[in-house]
Amino acid sequence: MTVSLAELVQYLDELLEISQWEKLDSSLNGLQVEGGRKVGKIAFAVDACEQTFQSSRDLGVQMLITHHGLFWGKPLPLTGTHRARLKLLLESDISLYAAHLPLDFHPLIGHNACIARGLGLENKGPLTQESGLEIGTLARPQAPLEFSEFVRRVDRLLDTSSRSLPFGPARIDKVGIISGHGSKVLDEALSARIDTFLTGESSHTFYHFAREFGLNVVFAGHYATEVPGLKELAGRLEERFGLSTVFIPAPTGF
């Protein structure tokens, strides 16, 4: 089974509402590198890098979909590592599609929504808004949940070894989820709406914020929190187009 690259890109752009994130996201979301006209097998990976490009070539895929693409904010000269990465893609006739914030915050297949579902939490909608766009997920357990059990669920779901700041209640009821580097979004007003915050990347300066505002925080790893949406998207494309998909693991330890 194959589908045209143009049809696939149009479907992805519409599903992920790529255009609405242009004003907030520095990533060049959407098709970044054009390969062959037909796609039968798609690889998924968190990062656009030499490792995932080589794996894509070896797996014989026609498209790679990543969370972190190659282009951010400004043009880059085609020299050094950037040239080598593009050369590998073009010689292999592999298309590269990137979905950064659109895949973090999609209400159904985004990383945050997938994490909430996987933890057995009820999705209560966005955690906050920025520039009119919905950011993060507010989620609640059916009944108050021991924080220690919540951490165990996170580690099991994301196959990670998280770090936590247990400065909130021992039994939790209101969880905010922002994948990746989410701590930069949290402020005093937002922290008052939740008792526990789950994100990927840790921060030295966040320790005292969490302590002073009585907030539990779980840092589950930037990489680990940005896998679930990719796997969910893979399932959508398999179901919609009958395509073959594969996830390329390339964990960074962060």
Image: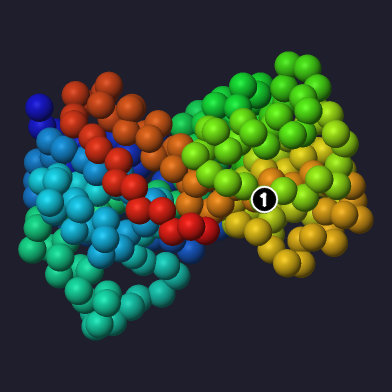
29 relative to 125 in the view: left or right: left
Q: Say which quadrant the N terminus sits in.
A: top left
Identified by mark 1, the residue type is Arg
Residue 129 at least partly seen: no
Residue 249 at least partly seen: yes
- From the top left corner, tell me how far across and down residue 154 is, in percent: 60, 36
70 relative to 85 in the view: left or right: right
- From the top left corner, tell me how far across and down residue 199 is, in percent: 63, 48
Q: Which residue is drawn at 20% across and 53% down?
A: 55
Q: Residue at x 48, y 52 (%)?
A: 223
Q: Tag 1's secondary structure?
A: strand
**Residue 194 lies in quadrant:** top right
Please tell me whether residue 5 is drawn above or below residue 69 in the rendered image: above
Which of 109 and 175 lies nearest the eye of the viewer?
175
218 relative to 180 in the view: left or right: right
- From the top left corner, tell me how far across and down residue 27 is, in percent: 43, 61
- From the top left corner, tell me how far across and down residue 234 is, in percent: 32, 33
Q: Which residue is drawn at 27% across and 56% down?
A: 52
- Badge 1 is on which residue? 163
